[in-house]
Image (spheres, rainbow, N blue to C red):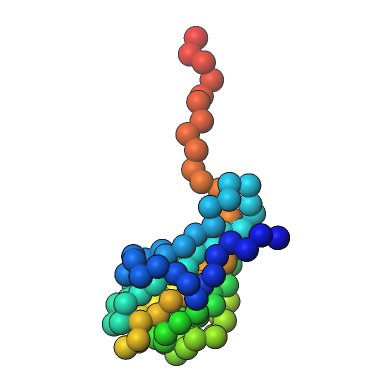
Amino acid sequence: MPILTNTSAQPGEPRRGPVWSIAEPDRELDSNLIRLPAGDSIPAHVGAEVDTLVHVVRGDGALVTQDGEEPLRAGDVALLPRRTVRGFRAGEDGLEYLTVHRRRQSLQIKSGPPSA
């Protein structure tokens, strides 16, 4: 299996958002490395139709759920069940985390039956 990336050797930009994503077209999994600068956050929202595994790569912060906040630190692994509330808040050193989930099918426009 080829190595896709090294989470320890990512570029400094972008400073916020997806730093890396799987690019291979024929796959069943999606994975993204997300970066939040110190004090930044992703507001709590209802997750998609897929379970998501989160691994904190660097930094610290909090995972926000419907039950409150759970502290996060480098090395933590969390499972976010589908359709549950989740949000992230970066601590003073920022927060970088890897997500892994089943690939969601993208919406595609299909042609209807030919007109008569």
Task: Tell me the residue at 57%/72% (across/down).
Answer: 53
Q: Position of residue 114 (x, y in %)?
A: 51, 15
Q: Position of residue 58 (x, y in %)?
A: 45, 82
Task: Tell me the residue at 54%/85% (across/down).
Answer: 76
Q: Position of residue 23 (x, y in %)?
A: 53, 52
Q: Return the residue found at the far left.
A: 39
Count of numbered circles in the view: 0
Report if residue 35 is visible in the image: yes
Quadrant hosting residue 31: bottom right
Task: Tell me the residue at 50%/76% (across/down).
Answer: 8
Q: Nearer the viewer, residue 86 or 24?
A: 24
Quadrant hosting residue 39: bottom left
Task: Tell me the residue at 40%/68% (across/down).
Answer: 11
The quarter in which the N terminus is drawn is: bottom right
Q: Position of residue 70 (x, y in %)?
A: 46, 88
Q: Nearer the viewer, residue 85 or 12?
A: 12
Report if residue 46 is visible in the image: no
Q: Return the residue found at the far top.
A: 116
Q: Return the residue found at the far right.
A: 1
